[in-house]
Image (cartoon, rainbow, N blue to C red):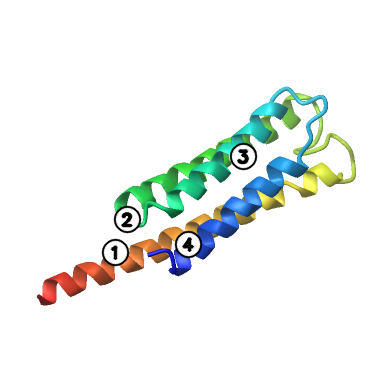
Amino acid sequence: MLQRIQTVHMLIAALLSAVFAYLYRPEALAFGGVYTYGMWAVAAVVTVNIFLYRNRPLQMRLNTLIIMAILVFAGLRVYEAVASGGNAFSGEKALSKKDVLWIIPVVSIVFVKLANQAIKRDDNLIKSVDRIR
């Protein structure tokens, strides 16, 4: 069923990922395209994952993979910033607008994790009902 709370959580995560991919415009970053295309891919996978509601274990595994993918993108960004000799984000003393955008994937991770917990709760509920029968 699509009218579940995890659907709302995954929809918010997909929208946040798409907003990040749309707003993040890399200029001189080596992995700039990876961030943009990667977050578009994350948004697409989360959207497809919404419609896999009949297969809860697959949904939970895909959500875990989504979280790992977002963490890899964030790790690449930190690695790139440190390797360029700057601080962990922009290489400047003050945070730029692009650095503040990296809050969006963190919030997206939170919503995917909330969806995963709701899916697990549904799975446990269905298993407990099956025991009663």
Q: Residue at x 32, y 55 (%)?
A: 56
Mark 2 Cα shell of 10 Å, populated few (<14), some (14-19), many (≥20): some
Mark 1 lies on residue: 123
Q: Residue at x 47, y 69 (%)?
A: 5
Q: Is residue 125 above or below residue 48?
A: below
Mark 2 lies on residue: 56
Q: Residue furthest left?
A: 133
Find the distance from the CA under tag 1 to the CA under tag 4: 15 Å
What x and y, as percent, mark residue 132?
12, 77
Q: Classify residue 79 as left or right of residue 52.
A: right
The C terminus: image quadrant: bottom left
Mark 4 lies on residue: 7
Sequence-earlier tag: 2 or 3:
3
- Look at the numbered disc 3 and give the secondary structure of its residue: helix
Q: Are marks 4 and 3 in contact (CB under 8 Å)?
A: no
Number of the label disc, if any, that sits on residue 39: 3
- Look at the numbered disc 2 and give the secondary structure of its residue: helix
Find the distance from the CA under tag 4 to the CA under tag 3: 19 Å
Q: Is residue 27 above or below residue 67?
A: above
Q: Are marks 1 and 4 in contact (CB under 8 Å)?
A: no
Q: Residue at x 85, y 46 (%)?
A: 97
Sequence-earlier tag: 4 or 2:
4
Q: Are marks 2 and 3 in contact (CB under 8 Å)?
A: no
Quadrant of the rendered structure where residue 30 is? top right
Q: Are marks 1 and 2 in contact (CB under 8 Å)?
A: yes
Q: Classify residue 51 as left or right of residue 103.
A: left
Mark 3 Cα shell of 10 Å, populated few (<14), some (14-19), many (≥20): many
Find the distance from the CA under tag 1 to the CA under tag 3: 28 Å
Sequence-earlier tag: 4 or 3:
4
What x and y, as percent, mark residue 88?
75, 38
Sequence-earlier tag: 1 or 4:
4
